């Protein structure tokens, strides 16, 4: 029998209302101990759900919401105590629940119970997480779609077709005396090709989804004074990094979450990369190189009014061209006739060169478009079933590979057993994707990033 868990379900900050949530077989008993209904209550008679006004004894007046399992969020008996939203007050209310027999919930434990009790699937649990952390309108819409079960439905369709095929092949091979019509190769191949196409389209169509939903890590690098901090400020809309006209002042790294086009960037402004013996700056340079290595996207900022220097060239030499945008900044300083064009050495080697001014804001749309192109989010439509996390994408890729192997086995006249083995692999991968029959490790991974109280 599971134990009873409790946590503060609202944010740890002063607010109008704060909620302590309790779930498990002992939830009602705990509520009975710590909550005194103002007008009395027959606890045993509660079916479905009830809302009761009263007091968390000695702590605060409260509204108590009682949900009788299995019709609750977790599928268990659930109690939510809605108090005033003071962090200290809520901690006291939580402590009262713990003293009355509850155990402190771990991250995501309420949602995990919802999954274990069959209230929602694993992909929906992941969607709950995204609803909470969504930073963009599109991310929110995508999470809602996922919560509706669009992905699970799509995957179930593919999976059922593969199971039916595997069953037919198995029955035909294992029971030759039964009069099972052999599936023609054509029919079997049609099923496999259908599955192949569905998975391929899903994977292709989801490429941008992870970038939009999970965000993209980006590094801002370039010589001191090229305008990195100014650009960061322009994107965040406030003076977070200190901008000065002295070279080499941004020695520490600063990370901000900013919107660029439809992307959420975790943008790290690194110390200016330059050849230096100065120990403090040297540490900064190392951090820059490190940030570049770990980033999905690199913005190399160069000062257009000075033209490309040897240091710039050296830096560009260390960049991975596929995910680098050369930001030709301070374009406002260049008068049209004698405008420095981006040097041919950049244009030849780098696909993405944009001219910007951190001062006027010119060119930031181009920057957004280039970033969207690199992250493949230009055509992202949040209203459809999509693979929203890396975990889901990996499962789908594994299934696709197994389906292709099955097709290869069919087309090359391998024994039915060989086809069956591939089909089994594909089906397993799809089960893991939606969380049915997923191993503990998978479930663990999904809930690790959750906040306590959800
Ligand atoms: P960082 O060292 O690369 O972070 O460069 P900063 O952002 O500190 O900028 C250095 C100087 O260049 C500051 O005086 C900025 O105001 C100026 N600056 C940055 N971007 C631009 C730009 O696009 N146009 C102009 N005119 N000045 C800029």
Image (spheres, rainbow, N blue to C red):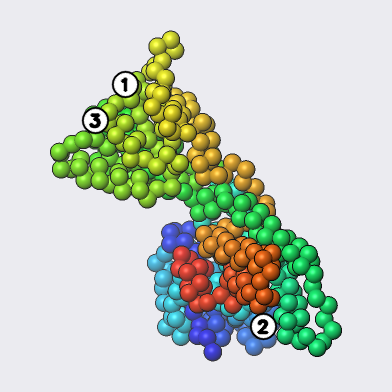
**Helix or strand or loop: what does disc 3 sit on?**
loop
- Residue depth check, mark 2 versus mark 3: number of the one nearer the observer: 3
Q: Which mark is residue 46?
A: 2
Q: Give above or below for 6 relative to 374.
A: below
Residue located 41% across and 73% down the image? 92
Q: Residues within 10 Å of mark 3 (few under 14, many from 20)?
A: few
Q: Give above or below for 304 relative to 76.
A: above
Q: Is residue 293 left or right of residue 11?
A: left
Residue 341's x, y, as percent? Answer: 42, 19
Residue 403 occupies quadrant: bottom right
Q: Residue furthest top?
A: 337
Residue 104 occupies quadrant: bottom left
Looking at the image, which is closer to me, 267 or 409? 409
Q: CA distance from mark 2 to mark 3?
A: 70 Å
- Residue depth check, mark 1 versus mark 3: number of the one nearer the observer: 1
What residue is disc 1 on?
306
Q: Is residue 124 left or right of residue 390?
A: right
Query: Can I make out residue 401 in this image?
Result: yes
What residue is disc 3 on?
247
Q: Is residue 23 left or right of residue 275?
A: right
Residue located 49% across and 46% down the image? 264
The reply to whether the C-beta atoms of the residues labelled 1 and 3 are less than 8 Å apart is: no
Residue 150's x, y, as percent? Answer: 68, 61
Q: Residue furthest front?
A: 413
The reply to whether the C-beta atoms of the residues labelled 2 and 3 are less than 8 Å apart is: no
Q: CA distance from mark 1 to mark 3?
A: 14 Å
**Helix or strand or loop: what does disc 2 sit on?**
loop
Query: Can I make out residue 240 in this image?
Result: no
Residue 388's x, y, as percent? Answer: 57, 57
């Amino acid at each position: 029998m599971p134990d009873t868990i409790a946590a503060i379900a609202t944010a740890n900050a002063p607010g109008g209302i704060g909620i302590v949530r309790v779930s498990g077989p002992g939830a009602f008993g705990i509520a009975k101990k710590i909550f005194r209904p103002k007008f009395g209550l027959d606890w045993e008679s509660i079916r479905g759900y009830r809302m009761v006004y009263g007091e968390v004894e000695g702590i605060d007046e409260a509204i108590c919401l009682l949900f009788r399992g299995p019709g609750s969020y977790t599928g268990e008996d659930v109690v939510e105590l809605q108090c005033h939203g003071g962090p200290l007050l809520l901690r006291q209310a939580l402590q009262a629940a713990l003293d009355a027999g509850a155990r402190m919930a771990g991250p995501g434990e309420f949602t995990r119970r919802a999954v274990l009790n069959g209230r929602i699937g694993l992909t929906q649990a992941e969607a709950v997480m995204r609803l909470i952390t969504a930073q963009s309108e599109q991310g929110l819409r995508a999470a809602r779609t996922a919560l509706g079960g669009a992905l699970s439905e799509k995957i179930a369709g593919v999976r059922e077709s593969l199971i039916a095929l595997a069953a037919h092949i198995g029955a035909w091979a294992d029971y030759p005396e039964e009069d099972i019509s052999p599936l023609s190769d054509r029919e079997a191949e049609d099923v496999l090709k259908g599955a192949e196409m569905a998975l391929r389209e899903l994977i292709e169509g989801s490429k941008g989804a992870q970038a939009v939903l999970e965000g993209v890590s980006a590094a801002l690098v370039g010589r001191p004074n090229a305008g990195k901090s100014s650009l960061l400020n322009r994107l965040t809309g406030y003076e977070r990094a200190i901008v000065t006209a002295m070279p080499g002042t941004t020695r520490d790294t600063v990370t901000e979450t900013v919107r660029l086009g439809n992307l959420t960037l975790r943008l790290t402004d690194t110390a200016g990369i330059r050849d230096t013996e100065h120990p403090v700056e040297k540490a900064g340079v190392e951090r820059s190189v490190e940030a570049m290595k770990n980033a999905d996207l690199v913005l190399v900022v160069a000062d257009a009014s000075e033209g490309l220097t040897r240091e710039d060239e050296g830096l560009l030499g260390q960049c991975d061209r596929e995910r680098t945008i050369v930001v030709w900044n301070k374009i406002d300083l260049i008068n049209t006739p004698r405008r420095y064009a981006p040097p041919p050495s950049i244009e030849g080697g780098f696909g993405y060169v944009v001219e910007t001014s951190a001062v006027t804001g010119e060119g930031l749309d181009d920057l957004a478009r280039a970033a969207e192109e690199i992250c493949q989010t230009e055509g992202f439509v949040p209203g459809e079933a999509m693979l929203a996390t890396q975990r889901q994408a990996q499962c789908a890729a594994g299934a696709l590979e197994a389906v292709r192997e099955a097709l290869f086995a069919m087309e090359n006249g391998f024994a039915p057993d060989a086809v069956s083995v591939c089909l089994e692999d594909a089906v397993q991968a799809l089960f893991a994707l939606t969380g049915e029959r997923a191993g503990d490790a998978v479930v663990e991974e999904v809930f690790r990033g959750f906040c306590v109280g959800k």
